[in-house]
Structure formats: structure tokens, C-alpha cells
Amino acid sequence: MKSSAIYKWLNWSLAVGLGALLALPAMAQEDALKAFPGYVDFGELSSIFGEPTVQISIGSSLLNLVGSLSAEEDPEAAELFRKLNGVRVNVFETETMAEGAVDLVKDISSKLSSSGWESVVTVNSADEQVRVFMKINAEMVDGITVMAIEENEAVFVNVIGNINPEELKRVMKNFDVEIDR
Amino acid sequence: MSRKFRQWVDDYQDQAWTLARYLLKDPAEAEDACQEAFVKLWKNQDRIDPERIRPWLMKVTRNGCLDRLRRRRPTEEWQEWQRADDGPGPLQDVQQHELGQWLKHSINGLTEPYRSLVVLRDVQQHSYEEVANVLELSLSQVKVYLHRARKQLREQLAEVRP
Amino acid sequence: MTHEGHNDRPDAKTGEEPLLDRQLDSLFEQLEIEKAPPGLTRRLYRIPEEQQAGQGWWRRLLQPAQAPRWVLVPALAAALLVVGVFLTVSRQPSQAEIFQARQDLAVAFSYIDKAGALTGQEIQSVLGGKLRDELRDPVKENLSKHMPFTEQSRKEEST
């Protein structure tokens, strides 16, 4: 290999390596979540829908902190958040119920069904496609996945952790936060 | 080798020309862009899978046209041009036989990659896979974007048809 | 995610879309692939001859500019130092981040709730007490009937 080629390779490697290393924290969190059975790989959503209007990814340490803040008034919430490993939300604006979006939901649904997820809600209509799946493990739920495609919005939610649905429902109901959207 | 290349010219020059015309509009530039693409085909013919000559050539033609457009205009103007404001606008009493011409203008009014998508898929009838290859998009992306492009054209058609 | 306006689309738009689609398809069929002009064909046919005549005469003279080696080594070292510091310092979330996380959770919950994932009483009892059992199809059907946003429940609501 000529020396000029070696230098070119070194420059390129350095740029790529630095970029990759600086992206480590976000990647690390996402990678850590992948290890859990309740994690769902939605694929390259941005490549289909463009930039998300809402993108949320909360890991266990933040969830723990959120829970500990409300430990006094709501110990149940604190306990629930302590057991959650991650909450991921991606929301995209769509102009219409695009065929590719519906195909994607069907693909993911089929993969989930064949890997032990239970289908809990299915809506198939011209106006909307909704799928809700749960990964059930003995007495707890390892993950909840919600996919919903409507005329102007596509939503992908994945809750990961040891979830007691009753607890989650109560906490959701009582979770009193002014949503600034 | 020359005979094989000549066959490729016979098979694909019309499609390359049509695509270049839609993108560049100017016939002289479109000719130059086509020639550049075929020169690249000549130089790289040993490296291209013979089954994939057509999408390869369309990709190179399109990229060449886009490069020319960027060189033609500075960056900000290029972005404005991408908005392609020489769409047909509202027309009154467009007769049926004029709608074909109207559609051509409408396609020119689409921004990239929608314009290339419509030309490749709806005008030239390339498969979805080929279109995805040419535009370096995923299959799902092609379908979603094509859906959007047709929606735009449909809306414009609804306004102008007799 | 909203459920408003599903029945509010202008009738003209809803009914006309397939018709417009057909009309668009028919117009596309009218658009032919343009024939390349004869001048272009001649130019393309000449390419092999021109390229073969030029081969061996042209060579790349300009080498890409390279940073001298002595620049690369400290640059690499600096990068490694940055990474090392980054990885070893444990990063605690700030108050603002915690606050934002609460907001984000509320948003996430609102989407889950809208999808009706956990609002049915039936699903609570089944999953709470009988998670070991397989969810049989009739059970699933029964569950889905009582979930909001299913066709069946909407029909029941409207009657």
C-alpha cells in the first residue's frame, strides 16, 4: 500500500472513529436497552418517515430519578419507575396513510408475533392501523409496544422493564404533569 | 466490447435522455449529461453486474444531472430551484389532450427526489427495486415518497381537469 | 394522535381519489419515453473509439493533500484523551433533564393510553392473575371487544 494511501486511510479512520466515539453515550443507552427482552427494534424509521416530531428515549437511571422525586407522594410510581428499564417514543408527521408505513407496521407485527409477543390490540381500518403487543413473562410484562399509523401521524412506543400492567395503569392515571407539546 | 456497449446505447439511451430532460430541461445539457453517464459506463463496465446496468446507468445519469444543477446555481439558489416553481399553476379549461402536456409540466414542478421517482417509476416503468437502487432509498421509502408525489399530482389534477 | 375529523373529510376529496388516480395513470400512459436525438446517439456510439484513443495518455497528476505524519499522531492522541475523559467521568442528569424526562414520560403515557393498551378492566384481570395461561383466541376476541379504538367497540358506542 502506498504511503499516500496509508495517510488517506488514517485520516478517514480518525474522522470516523472520533465521530463514533462522540456518539457513544446515546448509542450506549440504546445498546443497553437492546439487551432486554422487552426491547423492540423498529428499524430505520427516520429513513421512511423523515425527522420525528417527537423522539423520546429515557433510560433506567433517569426513570429511577423521576421515580425518586415522587417517592413521598407516590411510592407506587417510584417503585414502578425503579423497575422500568426504558421508555422509547417516536412520533412522525405523515401526510397520509402511506403504503410503506402500513407495510412496516405489518413487518414489525409479524416479527413480534413470531418472537413471543402477544397481540393485545389490533385495529385495521382505512383511517388507522393500531397494534399493541405485550411480551409476557410468567407474572410480569417485559415490554409493551404500541404502533399506530393514522392519516397525519405515525407513533411507535416501546416500554421496557418489569411491568405490572395494573400498576402502570394506576401510575399513568395519576401522573399529573402539564404536557408542553 | 464495443458491440456490447453499442447494444447498451441502443437499449438505454432513450431512458437516460428522458430522465436527463426532465431534470435539466435544456436539451444541450441533457445530451452532455447523457454522454458523461455513458462514458462512465464505458470506464466501469467490467465492475458492473450485467443484470444491473440499467439502474446503474440511471443512477449515474441522475447524479450527473443533479451535479450540473448545483454547479449551474449557487447553493441557496439551488435549494430554491429544487422547489421548482415553474410548475403549471392553475389552468382554465384545460382540454383532455392537453392534460398530458400539463402532466409533464407538473412533474417538472415536483422537487427532488419526487420528480426522479415519478419519472423512473410512472413514466419509465422501472420496478420499485430498481428505483430504490437508482435513488439510493429503501423500498419502503420509495413507496412512501411515491405516494406523496402522486398525492401532489392528484391534487393539482383535481384543480385543472375539465 | 387524534381521532378527530375522521368522518369530516370533504366528500368530494374522499370519493374522487380513486377516480383521480385512474386519470393520473391514464395520463402517465400517454407520456412516452422520449427518443434520444440522433446527434446524441452518434456521440454515444463514438465513446469506445474516443476512450480507447485516450487510454494510456492521461494520468492522475494531482495527489490528495495529506497531513504530514507528525500531525496525525498528536491528533490521534488528543482524540483518545477526549474519549478517556468522557468515559471515566460519570455523568449525572441535571434537574432540567429530570424535569424533561417527566414531561417526556407524560407524553409517552398519553400515547399508550390513547392506544387503549391498558385501559380495559378485562386485560388487567387476565394479565394480573393468569399470565401463565395461554391467551386463547376467544379470550383475545373478548378482550379486543372491550378495548377502545377497535371497530367493535366503536360500533357499540355509536348504537
Image (cartoon, coloured by chain):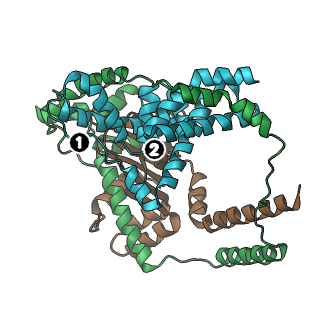
Chain colours: A brown, B cyan, C green
Q: How many badges with numbers are in the image? A: 2
From this view, report whether residue A103 is shown above or below residue C33.
Answer: below
- Write down the chain letter for disc 2: A
Which of pointers 1 and 2 indicates the residue nearer the eye? Answer: 1
Q: Position of residue A138 (x, y in %)?
A: 51, 43
Q: Is residue B96 left or right of residue B64?
A: left
Residue at (34, 69) in percent of width and height: A74
Q: Amino acid at mark 2?
A: Ile
Residue on which disc 2 sits: A48
**Which dot marks residue C52?**
none
Q: Position of residue B146 (x, y in %)?
A: 40, 35
Q: Is residue C62 left or right of residue A143?
A: right
Q: Secondary structure at mark 1?
A: loop
Measure how far apart labels 1 and 2 are at the Cα level: 29 Å
Residue at the left extreme of this rendering: C159
Quadrant in the picture for the C terminus of chain C: top left
Labelled pair 1, 2 in contact (Cβ < 8 Å): no
Q: Position of residue C117 (x, y in %)?
A: 34, 45
* Crowd tier of the residue under label 2, counting other residues whose Cα lies within 10 Å: few below 14, some 14–19, many 20 or above: many
Which image quadrant is residue B8 in?
A: top right
- Please tell me which residue lies in front, A136 or A36: A36
* Crowd tier of the residue under label 1, counting other residues whose Cα lies within 10 Å: few below 14, some 14–19, many 20 or above: some
Residue on which disc 1 sits: B89
Q: Is residue A119 visible?
A: no
From this view, report whether residue A112 is shown above or below residue B76.
Answer: above
Q: Is residue A175 left or right of residue B73?
A: left
Residue at (60, 36) in percent of width and height: B35
Residue at (62, 34) in percent of width and height: B56
Q: Amino acid at mark 1?
A: Gly
